[in-house]
Image (tube, rainbow, N blue to C red):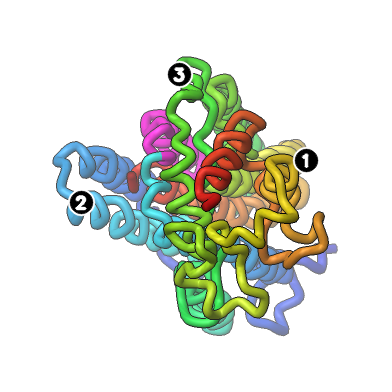
Amino acid sequence: MSDHANEHEHPNYVKTWGWLVVLLMISVAGPMLGIKVVTLITAFGIALVKALLVARNFMHVNVEPKFIGAVLVTTLSLMVLMFFLVAPDVMKHEGQRWINLSAAVPAPAPETAEEPPPEALFDAEATFQTICASCHGQSGKGDGIAAAALPVKPANFASPEFWETRDRESVLKVIREGGAAVGKDPLMAAYGGIYDEQQTEALADYVLSLKP
Amino acid sequence: MRPIATTRTAAGLPTSRLAVWWVIVSEIVIFGGVLVSYLMHRLGHSEWSDYAANTNMWFGAFNTLVLLSSSLSAVLAHQAASKGDGQLACKLLWLTILGALLFLLVKSVEWTMEISHGFTITANAFWSFYYTAAGLHAFHVLAGAVIMIFVANAAARGEELQRVEAVGIYWHFVDIVWIFLFPLLYIAK
């Protein structure tokens, strides 16, 4: 490869490609052992080695002026900076004086062609306990763990006065459209897009069952 | 007269190469933002590994092999161009373009299968990231292939041979992005 006049010696490109393929095979074989640490090392450790090989032997980054490397490292470090600045907001699901509503709502399962989600799986009580209870409390008294931090206290379903002005329809409306739709606190989110009509009715019936 | 892009050296390297490095620096910020956001959400949601279990590692592995091989033909095209052999550079660039088309073909078969199983971009946040990151990357593959058509045809006439190296550097960067997308989307489950 060095038989022609040039400013630098070329790496053996075919040999480099051979090494890249060997590394690819290792990263594919890694998960077959079923050991998580090995999978992570063969996946991401090898990805790093492959990337460095491509950058050095194919892109010739090492023969460029030093400032090219410096600019590349600068932008790469912006990625690391972004991770540590944003991660506390994204990765922390609970804290004091705030509630992460989107983290509390489980993502709907993808609708697969082979196995449509059976309707019977919806458990209104379990859903109430995981989603609603954080504010409304496990027995619906408006005393959930997040309630203390809320400026407007959540509804107490165990109070007879509460039910003087509500019926099944109004409960359904709040679950579907959120608190703001009935002139109540907007922190009560709208769940119409998350639960279908049948599920919303099951939830409303569960709330009605808490009536004293 | 030699083109400006090969001769102006105030920065210590040909302007065409400087320009490509500048493109890559901004691309790092674009892909970096997507990948870092994905990583945070992935680490913050253990249930995402169940969604990731539905990606097919063999599609990803095969496409990695295709891109690595197309990087080899791209760097060999650069070598041919630096020796002044525009004809060979053109052929090797077309080989690289074929690699890009094969990559996109495999990708479209893979996506068709996934979408028909209900794993669409709106299924959940994992699949949103999956299609955004891989789609943005596939768009770069397509753009690279189109650029290489022009560079290859000029190279066959012995023109603008410095562009063979420039488009090659871009192509290797697209390869590197995939090298990281592969474990992030296909291996870590």
Residue B92 in view, yes or no: no
Mark-to-mark CA distance, 3 and 2: 29 Å
Judging depth in this view, the residue of B181 and B71 nearest the camera is B181
Q: Is residue B63 magenta?
A: yes
Query: Which span is picked out in magenta?
Result: B51-77
Q: Residue at coordinates 62% horizontally, 68% vertically from top-left?
A: B29
Q: Residue B118: where, in percent of width, then height?
A: 56, 26
* Viewer-nearest of discs 3 and 1: 3
Q: Nearer the viewer, mark 2 or mark 1?
A: 2
Give percent across and percent down for residue A169.
74, 40
Using the rendered image, report if marks 2 and 1 lie on a common chain: no
Amino acid under disc 2: Lys
Which residue appears at 49% of the width and 49% of the height? A128
Residue B101: which quarter of the image? top right
Q: Which residue matches tag 2?
A: A36
Indicate whether residue B176 is drawn in magenta: no
> Where A82 sits versus B36, above or below?
below
Q: Tell whether B27 sits left or right of B2.
A: left
Dot 2 alpha-carbon crowd within 10 angstroms: few under 14, some 14 to 19, many 20 or more: few
Against B144, residue B63 (above or below) is: above
Disc 3: host chain: A
Q: Please say whether residue A201 is visible from this viewpoint.
A: yes
The residue tagged with tag 3: helix, strand or loop? loop
**Callout 3 amino acid:** Glu
N-term mark: 3 or 2: 2
Find residue B13 and report its horizontal and vertical position in percent. 64, 75
Determine which residue is flagged by label 3: A115
Q: Residue at x 47, y 33 (%)?
A: A122
Query: Mark 3 or mark 2, which is nearer to you?
Result: 3
Q: Marks 1 and 3: in contact by CB < 8 Å?
A: no
